[in-house]
Image (spheres, rainbow, N blue to C red):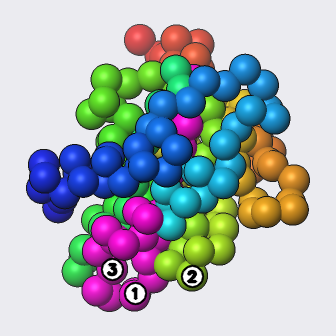
Amino acid sequence: MRSVVEREQLSKRAAEVEGYSWKVSDRADVPWSQLRALAREATRRSYAPYSNVLVGAAALTTEGTFVVGSNVENASYGLTLCAECSLVSDLVRQGGGRLRALAVVAGDGEPLAPCGRCRQVLYEHAGAALEIDQGEGHAVLTLGALLPHAFGPDDLPTRSTL
């Protein structure tokens, strides 16, 4: 678990990567290199004593701020938190909002696609339009392409049996 001081240091480092806030008006304005750098930095805070697979995630919100997360493993494996879940926690901790663009990388700095569980968690806080980085020179994917026919908050009123 990161201390308040560690989180502030990470936020400061994020700010040093050309600012912790970014205004985005269209797809070309997403600072992918910054997101990748923040995700790589987040891998340094991973807790992965069992798999030794470090994962970092960074996202840009629709308000133009960055959020980050690192994977946190647990000896019972099923309680492990992926970096994307940690990122969503950071989003909520900062006051909420919607995610706009996401980069996830392993400890080697190369992109990873979110797992199925994380896709569902991300959908709750971004929707199908979330842009997901696949690395330099590769086309950006949307969450909708990775999670077709997703179940989300809008489905609850029409599916409730009460």
Q: Residues within 10 Å of mark 3 (few under 14, many from 20)?
A: some
Q: Which residue is pictured at 66% across the width and 54% down the height?
A: 33
Disc 3 residue type (three-letter): Ala
User: Which numbered tag is attached to residue 75?
Assistant: none
User: Which numbered tag is attached to residue 51?
Assistant: 1
Q: Let me know if residue 53 appears in the view.
A: yes
Q: Which residue in the protein does label 2 denote?
A: 108
Q: Position of residue 63 (x, y in %)?
A: 52, 21
Q: Residues within 10 Å of mark 2 (few under 14, many from 20)?
A: few
Q: Position of residue 93 (x, y in %)?
A: 27, 33
Q: Provide the secondary structure element on which disc 2 rests.
A: loop
User: Which numbered tag is attached to residue 48?
Assistant: 3
> Would you say residue 139 sits in the magenta stretch?
no
Q: Residues within 10 Å of mark 1 (few under 14, many from 20)?
A: few
Q: Position of residue 60 (x, y in %)?
A: 55, 37
Start and end of the magenta stretch?
Answer: 41-62
Counting residues from the N terminus, which is met first, the one under dot 3 or under dot 2?
3
Cα separation, mark 3 vs mark 1, equals 6 Å
Q: Which residue is pictured at 39% across the width and 87% down the height?
A: 52
Would you say the residues marked 3 and 1 are in contact, meaning their CB atoms lie under 8 Å apart? Answer: yes
Q: Nearer the viewer, mark 2 or mark 1?
A: 2
Would you say the residues marked 2 and 1 are in contact, meaning their CB atoms lie under 8 Å apart? Answer: no
Cα separation, mark 3 vs mark 2, equals 14 Å
Residue sitting nearer the eye, 123 or 14 = 14
Disc 1 residue type (three-letter): Ser
Quarter assignment of residue 81: bottom left
Q: Let me know if residue 153 appears in the view.
A: no
Q: Which residue is pictured at 66% across the width and 68% down the height?
A: 111
Counting residues from the N terminus, which is met first, the one under dot 2 or under dot 1?
1
The C terminus sits in image quarter: top left
Taking 138 as reference, is 74 left or right?
left
